[in-house]
Amino acid sequence: MHRRPEDELLLQGVRAYFGTASVARIRALLHGDLEWAYVLRTATQHGVLPLLYKGLHTADVAAVPQPILAGLQEQFRANAVRNVWLTTELLKLLALFATHEIPAIPYKGPVVATALYGHLALRQCVDLDIVVQPRDLLRVQPLLVSQGYRLALTSAQAASFRQHRYHYAFVRTDGKVLVEIHWAFTRKHWALSYDPVHLWARLVSVPLAGHTVRSFHPEDLLLLLCVHGLKDHWARLLWIGDIAALLHRHPDMAWDRVLAQARQWGCQRILLLGLLLARDLLGAALPEQIIQKIQAAPVVSACARRVSHTLFSDTHPGVGDAGYLHLRERFRDKVLYLRHRLPSYLTPQAPDRALLALPAGLLCLYYVLRPLRLVGTHGLAFVRRAWKTWCCRDGGV
Amino acid sequence: MDPLDQHVRPHPDVVDTVLDAGETVLLHLESTMYYSLNATGTRIWQGLQHGLTLREISQCLQEVFAVETDRANRSVLTFVQELMQQNLVQACPG
């Protein structure tokens, strides 16, 4: 696909870090007329400014205008300082939880920076993510409050979150750090059937700033990162970079085991989508076994194309509801998702109200008007597509 | 030249951040090594950042911690030598 040169420079710059870039192409782009403000802004938004900075150094840093390079270096250093600070805060919280015998697993952020990229400075970290077991959730809150954090929820809201969501967001009162305490990885309608006991039993030791912390096994982390990416519409190149970095760091992945685990979790196609994005956008090497699985599930390539096309756009629709339903290989997971999404399809929207202005006493008729309008607008193709999605059996993996 | 009269500066590849407890954490961007400095180390590091000679830094420590000159001098020289070995600082041209 055709990309604007600035977007291509971003991708090639990150690829350069992984050693999969075309240095000649980077040089050609650098010698072109680039909108550098856009490059820097987009790199920051996508969380890959450190990788871009390092990647340009491996390509042709002399071709980067000096003021731009100086600005990149300044932001690289500022990000490193921020990450160091975040890491010390993370270690402090983990020590606090350990003192109170609360098992806590750091996830993403500085741990991924160190474990997958090998350097705290190479990943933009926005917040801290810590996973605890559901039984410890109510003990964690007062501990964080004692460290100057607050949860901007009422008791009733917090209770509702525990039932329907998967993490709390604590903000330190000075506003310097956001800590997300997770008890799950997705909302329930995603129906990710991982075994928490198995997950916690397979933790590995990860060096972090002179300490050792426990975090997820790389095979489990790969699945979690692919699920996270899809959940957030693959809106940031950083998340694809995390997949590429994991594959780069663990070239001897036990793929039979990963695929079996993904099948058990009900996310095998979601895994394949993450892997395909890492290959297509950042040149990650995939084994033949995985490539064959991808080829056997056309929905994976279709979703990857859609994500790739909208990666640098202002909106990130992700794979859409239809794409998501096709990506879930188990019928029961599709049903759960549809049951969650159905109210939003049935609930009248602005276009329905714009079609016909009904008096207050007849507003309920919009619920009848809406499906008629949808069929009329999109025709029978919509109905056929919806039915096909509902009954999707595209060969599976 | 007396070692105490030399100027030493932080290595350009080192970033630092001061923590709430008055400690400082250093990260060497090339070696990826991570170092923690206690309150005394933080004062010495800040003196280096401000371009003070090692003697001037020692004098600051004597004032703040009420220690004898010899002891302060030894602390500064030992600490800076350690930083030098870890490539966290470099001598300025005389």
Image (cartoon, helix red, strand yellow):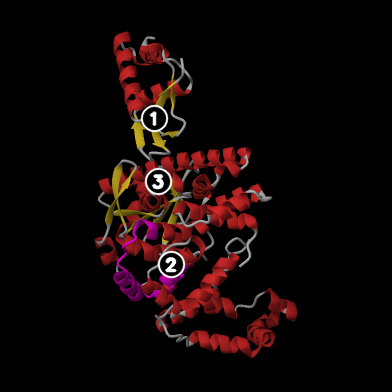
- Viewport quadrant of the N terminus of chain A: bottom right
Question: CB atoms at circles 2 and 1 under 8 Å apart?
Answer: no
Q: Which residues are magenta?
A: A247-276
Mark 1 is surrounded, within 10 Å at the Cα level, by few (under 14), some (14 to 19) or many (20 or more) other residues, namely many
Asked whether residue B35 appears in the rendered view, the answer is yes
Measured as percent of width and height from the top left, residue B76 is found at: 34, 18
Measured as percent of width and height from the top left, residue B24 is found at: 39, 31
User: Residue A119 versus residue A187: which sits nearer the camera?
Assistant: A119
| Residue tagged 1 | B88
In the image, residue A180 sits, relative to residue A356, either above or below, namely above
The amino acid sitting under disc 1 is Leu
Queried whether the magenta region covers residue A146, the answer comes back as no
- Viewport quadrant of the C terminus of chain A: bottom left
Between the residue at mark 2 and the residue at mark 1, the CA separation in whole angstroms equals 39 Å
The amino acid sitting under disc 3 is His
Question: CB atoms at circles 2 and 3 under 8 Å apart?
Answer: no
Secondary structure of the residue carrying numbered label 3:
loop
In the image, residue A169 sits, relative to residue B35, either above or below, namely below
| Residue tagged 2 | A275
Secondary structure of the residue carrying numbered label 1:
loop
Q: Residue at x 38, y 72 (%)?
A: A288
The amino acid sitting under disc 2 is Leu
Secondary structure mostly seen in magenta is helix
Locate residue A352 relative to residue A320 in the image: left or right: right
Question: In the rendered image, which quarter is residue A333 located in?
Answer: bottom left
Measured as percent of width and height from the top left, residue A29 is found at: 62, 53
For marks 2 and 3, the one nearer the N-term is 3
| Residue tagged 3 | A119
Asked whether residue A47 appears in the rendered view, the answer is no
Chain ID of residue with mark 3: A
Chain ID of residue with mark 1: B
